Amino acid sequence: MHPNWVLLFVFGIDRGNLSGLTDYRQRYTSAKTPGCNLFALIFSPIGMKKGWKRFINDLPFPSRFLYRDEFQQEYGKPDPAVPALYIQSGKIIQELISADEMNHIDSVDILISSVSKKLQQYFSS
């Protein structure tokens, strides 16, 4: 694997003021409240889910988790469709899992399977 690859998981929420915790709580208390599916999938009230953390740590390259506003600022994307997964190689950024796909994933196990499948497709092409 190329040493410069980085996975970029981009949340559909902005940083600050405990917005992530608020979003997580809202997701489970009101089905009508839009939230960040990625955040809700990988975090529990006590932190990152163990299975997800193990999966990320076992990948052969690093992962970064960015809030929407961080991604906009660092990568110059004014209105990204998020949550989403990107892969970065140097200055090139490619989307691996779109916001639409991410929002239809309903468990951390399916997320792990989807990320694994997308990485396999990316590296075999």
Image (cartoon, rainbow, N blue to C red):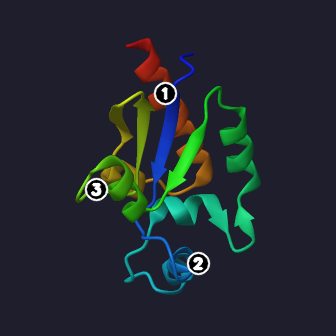
Percent of width and height locating residue 31: 43, 81
Identify residue type, mark 3.
Ala
| Residue on which the image places disc 2 | 21
State the CA–CA distance, disc 2 to disc 3. 21 Å
Q: Earlier in the sequence, mark 2 or mark 3?
A: 2
**Which numbered mark, 2 or 1, is in the foreground of this view?**
2
Residue at image position (71%, 48%) is: 53
* Residues at circles 1 and 3 in contact by the CB criterion of under 8 Å: no
Around disc 1, counting alpha carbons within 10 Å, would you say few (fewer than 14), some (14 to 19), or many (20 or more)? Answer: some
Percent of width and height locating residue 18: 56, 80
| Residue on which the image places disc 3 | 81
Q: Nearer the viewer, residue 106 or 6?
A: 6
On screen, residue 3 versus residue 77, left or right, reads right
Identify residue type, mark 1.
Leu
Which numbered disc covers residue 119? Answer: 1
Instruction: Give the secondary structure at mark 1.
Output: helix
Identify residue type, mark 2.
Leu
Q: Nearer the viewer, residue 84 or 118?
A: 84
Quadrant where the C terminus is found in the figure: top left
Instruction: Give the secondary structure at mark 2.
Output: helix
Around disc 2, counting alpha carbons within 10 Å, would you say few (fewer than 14), some (14 to 19), or many (20 or more)? Answer: some
